[in-house]
Amino acid sequence: MSEIPGTGPTDPYAPSVYDFPPARRRAAASAPRRDSTGVTRAVRDLNEARGAAEAAPNLRTERVETLRKQIAEGTYNPDPREIAREILGRGL
């Protein structure tokens, strides 16, 4: 960076980019920041939901495995009326 005036030992008398007058330093410090990096609220919510889902206990593992086995074997025969009753009972 010595080829840039004020940034290296080749030009010791050139003003440095850090030699702001005190008034400009105060103005720069109090100016609102325009550039920022951050995570949007939606991403934070998604990460929170993912964490909650991963932390939830998997209580239905046995039931899911039983159903997978029945489906694979061709022995799974759900009752459509019972499914409808359950859906209506839950208010879905």
Image (cartoon, rainbow, N blue to C red):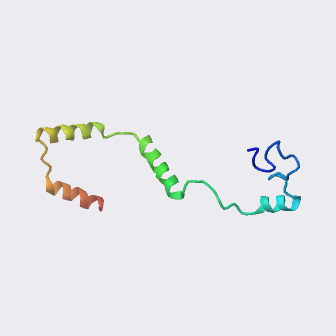
Q: Residue at 69% x, 60% y: name it.
A: 33
Toward which corner of the image does residue 23 lie, by quadrant?
Answer: bottom right
| Direction from residue 3 to residue 26 in the image, left or right | right
| Direction from residue 20 to residue 36 in the image, left or right | left
Toward which corner of the image does residue 91 lie, by quadrant?
Answer: bottom left
Q: Is residue 39 above or below residue 91?
A: above
Q: Residue at 14% x, 55% y: name it.
A: 80
Estimate the x, y position of residue 45 in percent, counting from the top left. 49, 54
Q: Quadrant of the N terminus?
A: top right
Q: Is residue 22 above or below residue 10?
A: below
Q: Quadrant of the C terminus?
A: bottom left
Between 28 and 40, the one lying in front of the other is 28
| Direction from residue 68 to residue 73 in the image, left or right | left
Q: Residue at 14% x, 52% y: name it.
A: 79
Between 41 and 66, the one lying in front of the other is 41
Q: Residue at 15% x, 57% y: name it.
A: 81
Estimate the x, y position of residue 34 in percent, counting from the top left. 66, 62
Q: Is residue 26 above or below residue 74?
A: below
- For the image, the number of numbered tags is 0
Q: Is residue 37 above or below residue 56?
A: below
Between 71 and 23, the one lying in front of the other is 23
